[in-house]
Image: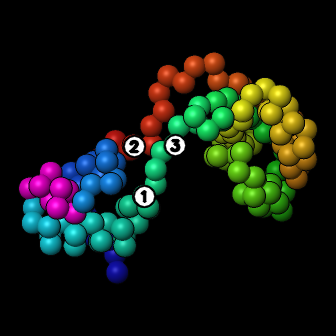
Amino acid sequence: MSDQPLDRIDLRILRTLQADGRLSNLKLAEAVALSPTAVLARTQRLQREGYILGYEARLNPLKLGLGMMVFVEVLLDRTTPNVFNEFKAAVQVHNAIMECHMVAGGFDYLLKTRMADMLAYREFAGNVLWQLPGVRETRTYAVMEEVKNTTQLWV
């Protein structure tokens, strides 16, 4: 079964849930001017069709002792399917690696990590990062100021 095209109400539901994923179905229905039954059916369809991937709480990294964000460029020693697969599998098991993106350009992967401080990053680099399969070279960029951080998509 193929996905139904999104209409303006579907988009309004998505925007509203991005702003507050904890809204009750009744409040969501009021916000988009539909009945609760219709909103529930649409929300379930949006989940089933993969437009809504899930719901989660956004945590404050400073309060949890993870105030230092570090981006890392990773250049692999070889760009073969087995090296890519080994690298991808290895990054999955490390919680400090929040995001891993294969990129086009002068390096192979861009990682987003969070640490307590530079000492914690140094330990991570030596014990985890430089031990990942196929890593030839890394470049580290410690974030000095987080100017914008959102997970919301423009829909």
Residue 59 shows which numbered tag?
Answer: 3
Q: Are marks 1 and 3 in contact (CB under 8 Å)?
A: no
The quarter of the picture where residue 121 lies is: top right
Q: Amino acid at mark 1?
A: Tyr
Estimate the spatial distance between the alpha carbons at disc 3 and disc 2, rounded to whole Å: 15 Å
Q: Are marks 3 and 2 in contact (CB under 8 Å)?
A: no
Residue 55 shows which numbered tag?
Answer: 1
Residue at the (38%, 61%) spot, across then down: 52
Please say if 114 is above or below 148. below
**Secondary structure predominantly adopted by residues drawn in magenta:** helix
Estimate the spatial distance between the alpha carbons at disc 1 and disc 3, rounded to whole Å: 13 Å
**Nearest-to-viewer mark from 3 and 2:** 3
Badge 3 local density, few (<14 within 10 Å), some, or many (20+)?
A: few
Residue denoted by label 2? 152
Estimate the spatial distance between the alpha carbons at disc 1 and disc 2, rounded to whole Å: 12 Å
Q: Amino acid at mark 3?
A: Leu
Residue extent of the magenta highlight: 25-33
